[in-house]
Image (tube, helix red, strand yellow):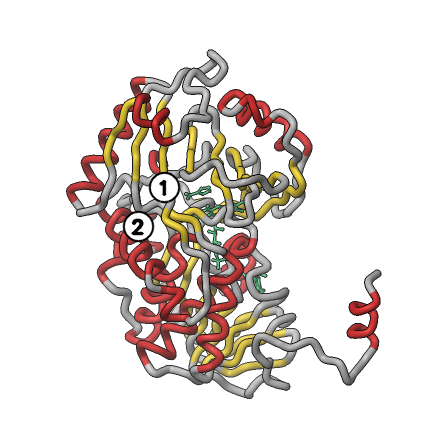
């Protein structure tokens, strides 16, 4: 073990500089408690303080900030969705992302790359045309391109995919970007803290007290908090938190895996997604290829990653880029994706007064971090959800008004 690490581990005098200090203890009561120190919970805290002047707020994180799906995702930001409601919502997020480094005063390495969703069949091309038309109608830059344009943008790609699944065209979305995911969590955390929000790591919520259908308090591993407003922003842990207030949701948890290669000189400018081969890839600012595949096809509450995943993914990536055969995969991991039946999130008020839900982010929620934070902050401050998230209300499932986004989900399902 490096000497420096040991020195800091055993010494009380040589504290590592902290990005921000944590208060010594919980206050007995807060105006609102946010469960989950991922991007969504932290962004909601930041906008509650910034947009609505609500600062008597606690964010409780059972692990460390960004240690959930926020720090496990493959950082793709885009708004080329299928429904007009989805496109408008994610477009508002892309716009917030474009100025976020400046707003939070932290370099998020926001990098606009252009995003290709590759089509290998005529029926996939039909979906691309559909998405392009909806996107353009709402003012989002997307168009259908032929294989010549894909080859021009990415000459390294074997357009025939080793003869197995020739690419015939793609949906091209110029604003598609990547951004450093953990910095998004840190930036929102520091911003919220500087505005007066209390953030506690290693603090688990074990129970939520409800009296006469109203939230009255939260039991935590650090003690009890009296509060009338609780936001659950816990992604893969949503069913556990909802059980605490007896609230059924249609969410199921499935693992989603990803991996990175050793770093290489920059060669891949764009983000490429293949719906048929169920793989996607981009190159990070460090030079690693960041890659992922389809959801694991079973419910499992675990972040275990498998050999089967890297084998399947590698074989498909090699169909697209045979020259990568000697490149090493250096890390793989998994996150717990909170999947909804219509591939759209669940946001807003619930039948329990004072209990708000920001969930159902499945494989697609990182890109929504800024706008979900802003929308949930408005929902809590006004006790009313903004129109922008009306299509994502929990009650849509009993009203048979689903917001079908399966055709725009990047990874296979
Ligand atoms: P999280 O970041 O998971 O935060 C929730 C937090 O709640 C966790 O830190 C957890 O520890 C905490 N928590 C849970 N229970 C408790 C409790 N009882 N008490 C206190 N704290 C608790 N989306 C995209 O848009 N683009 C992508 O490219 C993309 N790629 C992905 C790749 C992978 C491999 C995975 C797994 C997901 C991907 N996603 C992507 C989805 C995205 O990561 C998530 O939807 C998003 O990060 C959810 O953020 P969050 O803040 O809601 O949840
Ligand atoms: O939503 O763009 C996305 C995405 C890519 C990989 C996982 N999710």
Residue at (51% x, 33% y) in the render: 294
Q: CA distance from mark 1 to mark 2?
A: 10 Å
Mark 2 lies on a secondary structure that is helix
Residue at (34% x, 34% y) in the render: 407
Expressed as whole percent of the image width and height from the top left, the position of residue 48 reads 37, 75
Mark 1 lies on a secondary structure that is loop
Q: Which residue is mark 1?
A: 342
In depth, the one of 377 and 185 nearer the eye is 185
Q: Identify whether 205 is placed above or below 303.
A: below
Is the residue indicated by label 2 positioned so its CB lies within 8 Å of ligand 1?
Answer: no
How dense is the environment of label 1, judged by Cα within 10 Å: few (below 14), some, or many (20 and up)?
Answer: some
In depth, the one of 266 and 16 nearer the eye is 266
Toward which corner of the image does residue 160 lie, by quadrant?
top left
Frontmost of labels 1 and 2 is 1
Evaluate whether residue 83 shows in this view.
yes
Expressed as whole percent of the image width and height from the top left, the position of residue 102 reads 37, 68
Expressed as whole percent of the image width and height from the top left, the position of residue 236 reads 54, 52
Evaluate whether residue 211 shows in this view.
no
Q: Residue furthest front?
A: 265
Lower sequence index among marks 1 and 2? 1
Dot label at residue 270: none
The answer to whether mark 1 and mark 2 are in CB contact below 8 A is: yes
Expressed as whole percent of the image width and height from the top left, the position of residue 153 reads 36, 31
In depth, the one of 358 and 38 nearer the eye is 38
Residue at (22% x, 60% y) in the render: 387
How dense is the environment of label 2, judged by Cα within 10 Å: few (below 14), some, or many (20 and up)?
Answer: some
Residue at (36% x, 39% y) in the render: 115
Q: Which residue is mark 2?
A: 396
């Amino acid at each position: 073990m490096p000497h420096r690490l040991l020195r800091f581990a055993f010494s009380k005098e040589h504290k590592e500089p902290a990005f921000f200090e944590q208060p010594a203890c919980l206050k007995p009561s807060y105006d609102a408690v946010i469960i989950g120190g991922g991007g969504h919970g932290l962004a909601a805290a930041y906008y509650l303080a910034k947009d609505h002047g609500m600062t008597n707020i606690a964010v409780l994180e059972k692990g460390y900030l960004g240690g959930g799906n926020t720090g496990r995702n493959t950082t793709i930001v885009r708004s080329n969705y299928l429904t007009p409601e989805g496109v408008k919502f994610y477009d508002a997020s892309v716009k917030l992302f474009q100025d976020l480094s400046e707003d939070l005063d932290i370099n998020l390495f926001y990098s606009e790359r252009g995003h290709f969703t590759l089509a290998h069949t005529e029926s996939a091309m039909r979906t691309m045309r559909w998405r392009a038309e909806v996107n353009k109608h709402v003012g989002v830059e997307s168009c259908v391109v032929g294989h010549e344009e894909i080859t021009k943008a990415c000459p390294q790609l074997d357009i025939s995919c080793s003869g197995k699944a020739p690419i015939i065209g793609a949906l091209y979305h110029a604003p598609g970007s990547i951004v450093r995911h953990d910095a998004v969590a840190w930036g929102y955390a520091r911003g919220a803290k500087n505005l007066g929000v209390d953030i506690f790591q290693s603090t688990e919520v074990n129970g939520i007290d409800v009296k006469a259908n109203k939230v009255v308090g939260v039991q935590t591993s650090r003690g009890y908090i009296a509060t009338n407003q609780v936001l659950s922003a816990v992604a893969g842990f949503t069913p556990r938190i909802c059980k605490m207030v007896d609230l059924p949701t249609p969410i199921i948890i499935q693992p989603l895996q990803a991996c990175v290669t050793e770093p290489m000189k920059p060669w891949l400018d764009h983000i490429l997604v293949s719906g048929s081969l169920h793989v996607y890839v981009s190159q990070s600012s460090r030079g690693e290829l960041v890659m992922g595949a389809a959801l694991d096809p079973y419910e499992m509450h675990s972040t275990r990653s498998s050999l089967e995943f890297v084998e399947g993914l590698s074989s498909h990536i090699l169909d697209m880029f045979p020259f990568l055969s000697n490149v090493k995969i250096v890390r793989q991991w998994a996150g717990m994706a909170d999947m909804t039946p219509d591939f759209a999130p669940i946001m807003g008020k619930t039948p329990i007064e004072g209990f708000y839900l920001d969930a159902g982010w499945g494989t697609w929620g990182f890109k929504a971090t800024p706008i979900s934070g802003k929308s949930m902050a408005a929902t809590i401050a006004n006790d009313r959800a903004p129109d922008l998230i009306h299509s994502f209300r929990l009650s849509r499932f009993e009203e048979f008004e689903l917001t079908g986004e399966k055709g725009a989900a990047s990874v296979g399902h």
